[in-house]
Amino acid sequence: MRRLTVMVVLALLLAFAPPSGTALPAAPVDNGMVFGGQWSPANNATASVTHNLSDLPAVVEVFTATWCENCVDVEHALDDVQAEGWLQQYHMHRSIGETQDPFGTDMLDQRWRDKYGPSSPPAVEFNGTMKKIGSKADDGTLQNEFTNLAKADLDLGDGATSFAWNPLNNRSGTVTWALDIDSEHLDNATLNVTVYVVESSADFEEGSNGLGTYPHIVRSIVPVGESLQGSATVDLPVPFDGDDLEIHLIYEIMPEPVEEPTQPSTNDNTTGEDTPFVPFAMTVLIASLAVVVIQNRRN
């Protein structure tokens, strides 16, 4: 009877288990766009620099962790594409996991969840418009897939962006910006101007994925305005190690929320995001095991 029980369990698991190694294609995210990426070392003054919007590399936000082993393959592939000039990485570390990640914060975790939805590392966002989950390529190799995603045109037109940074001391500085963009992009949308404070790299030998040195670490995201041009003071966090903080200017164009009429609920048994969900396959498995256990006891 014991052998029968094992055979039933294995058969059910094989029947209902998802195929292993399945690659998930990148999916669109309907939450505006992210672009920019002009930057300066935090301890150096940078005079006003202007770039055409069409010349900017893709802004790639990476949800990662020092305990995430398959994040390593994703980040190495992104490094190859960045070396070709197609993208610029911003790594946001998850603040919880199998082991503590010293680079994660609750604020960054919540921002990712609010903006891109709940997900586990690795997850990669391209210009805030396309989301790739996992480390399996859906288009040949990860390098090919990431290159194609980074080359996607945001259709920003012939505009330009200017950026300047003036450090006041080793803990703060002033950022100045000016954005020239077609007004049609701002119809029924809100412009958010932000500064990503990035630590170029930091050492953490206890990281269980074996990297040891972790690059492109977003330490804080600072909103600085909603106008096409302006200036603001930015406070800097203490570096994890070294003295390699960077100031990156990032624009977000967010669609204004559309209020929809509320509909009365016709089902009181709603399932929320945090409510455990038992799929049909698991229900069948549990029921079958219960039958086997009862028969075993009778015998």
Image (cartoon, rainbow, N blue to C red):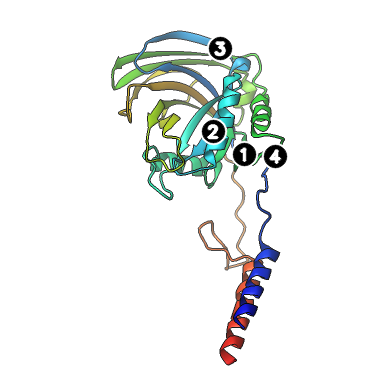
Q: Secondary structure at mark 3?
A: strand
Quick one: quadrant of the N terminus? bottom right
**Point 57% across, 63% down: residue:** 277
Q: Of callouts 4 and 3, which one flags the residue occurring earlier in the amino acid sequence?
A: 3
Q: Of callouts 1 and 4, which one flags the residue occurring earlier in the amino acid sequence?
A: 1
Q: Secondary structure at mark 4?
A: loop
Contact? badges 2 and 3 (CB < 8 Å): no
Q: Of callouts 2 and 4, which one flags the residue occurring earlier in the amino acid sequence?
A: 2
**Point 30% across, 28% down: residue:** 238
Quick one: label 2, few (<14), some, or many (20+) residues within 10 Å?
many
Quick one: label 4, few (<14), some, or many (20+) residues within 10 Å?
some
- Front-lying residue, 168 or 143: 143
Q: Of callouts 2 and 1, which one flags the residue occurring earlier in the amino acid sequence?
A: 2
- Front-lying residue, 163 or 1: 1
Task: Report the side of 173 relative to 61 (left or right).
Answer: left
Quick one: label 3, few (<14), some, or many (20+) residues within 10 Å?
some
The circle drawn on residue 132 is 1
Amino acid type of the residue tagged 4 in the rendering: Asp
- Front-lying residue, 84 or 160: 84
- Give the quarter of the image for residue 166: top left
The circle drawn on residue 75 is 2
Q: Secondary structure at mark 2?
A: helix
Report which residue position mark 4 lands on. 138
